[in-house]
Amino acid sequence: MQATQLPQQAIRGLRRVTAGIQASDGDGVNLTRMIGGPELNMLDPFLLFDVFESDRPDDYIGGFPAHPHRGFETVTYLLAGRLRHRDSAGHEGVIEPGDVQWMTAGRGIVHSEMPEQENGLLQGFQLWVNLPAREKMCAPAYQEFSAEDLAVAYEPGGIQVRIIAGRSDGGLTGPVINHHVSPLFMDISLPAGQTFEQGVDAGDNAFVYVIDGAVAVGTPERDLESRELGILQHGERVRLRAQRAARFLLVAAQPLREPVARGGPFVMNTPEEVMQAFEDYRNNQFKDQ
Ligand code: MN
């Protein structure tokens, strides 16, 4: 007779690796588009993932002057530098290192995102998270947290986990609330040789972006290097081992599995809804939100 075995939880392997494409957006901001370009159009519900990292003012000084959004959420997470955010409803603030702004554009906002610096390093991320059809025309809203508002888990071996959204295995929960896709968004620092494990809903789409260092993903291990994004296979657990001291983002969420119609800053379910968004924007329907 064989001993009864506990069910093995599937460790997620690497499904695909990309280094993204160099892109320019806003007023000449140079960035790397990891998700949202022709090579990797989306990873449901993630519509876009941009990485910006430069100490050359020419790469970022133009910023993102006034532009609209409708139908999804934009998440800005900053590691270095300062970004001033201002919208058409008078909402304004400065995003500083370690801060996160999770903005629900809903039926529409017009905003600008401008560097609050003339030199030095600007480094951070912007993620676009889709909204379900029934929520695309909801009222705009902000969830803004400074670095000290984030939950930070300190685990044995010098592992540090900053939790923006979702729940760590140790029971700490990040401040961002999103019941539509229940996202997980963690910023993990891992000393060389240490292993990080985290439970993830088996059917969620998930990716790892390596900010610094290198990690080995899954079993058997596959390497993911600095400035690479790895899409993970489905499964209940993520396991990452630092080959060199590493810092990386782990991001996951439930896919929406709805039709996606994109038109620049508008992401809806049908082309007609995108046309309507352009028309509403032309008619200043976004201004008095
Ligand atoms: Mn924007």
Image (cartoon, helix red, strand yellow):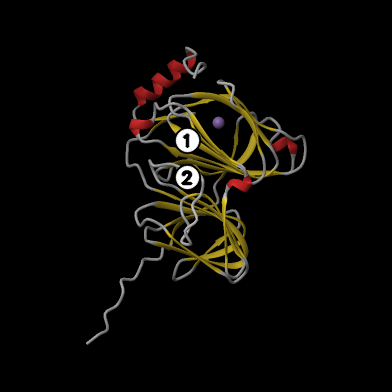
* Type of amino acid at the residue the image marks with label 1: Glu
On the image, the x and y values in percent for residue 276 come to 39, 19
Mark 2 residue CB less than 8 A from any atom of ligand 1: no
At a point 56% along the width and 64% down the height, the residue shown is: 215
Sequence-earlier tag: 1 or 2: 2
- Which residue does the numbered mark 1 point to in the structure image? 73
Quarter of the rendering containing residue 245: bottom right
Residue 52 visible (yes or no): no
Q: Is residue 211 above or below residue 239?
A: above
Q: Tag 1, which secondary structure? A: strand
Q: Is residue 252 above or below residue 279?
A: below
Residue 34 visible (yes or no): yes
Quadrant where the N terminus is found in the figure: bottom left
Between 279 and 95, which is closer to the camera in this rendering? Answer: 95
Dividing the image into four quarters, tell me where ligand 1 lies: top right
136 sits to left or right of 120: left
At a point 40% along the width and 24% down the height, the residue shown is: 274
As drawn, the residue found furthest toward the right would be: 119
On the image, the x and y values in percent for residue 151 come to 55, 52
Between 270 and 39, which is closer to the camera in this rendering? Answer: 270
Q: Is residue 36 above or below residue 13?
A: above
At a point 45% along the width and 66% down the height, the residue shown is: 218
At a point 35% along the width and 42% down the height, the residue shown is: 256
How far apart are the two marked residues, 1 and 2, measured between alpha carbons? 22 Å
Q: Tag 2, which secondary structure? A: loop
- Which residue does the numbered mark 2 point to in the structure image? 39
Between 46 and 162, which is closer to the camera in this rendering? Answer: 162
On the image, the x and y values in percent for residue 91 come to 59, 25
Quarter of the rendering containing residue 236: bottom left
Quarter of the rendering containing residue 41: top left
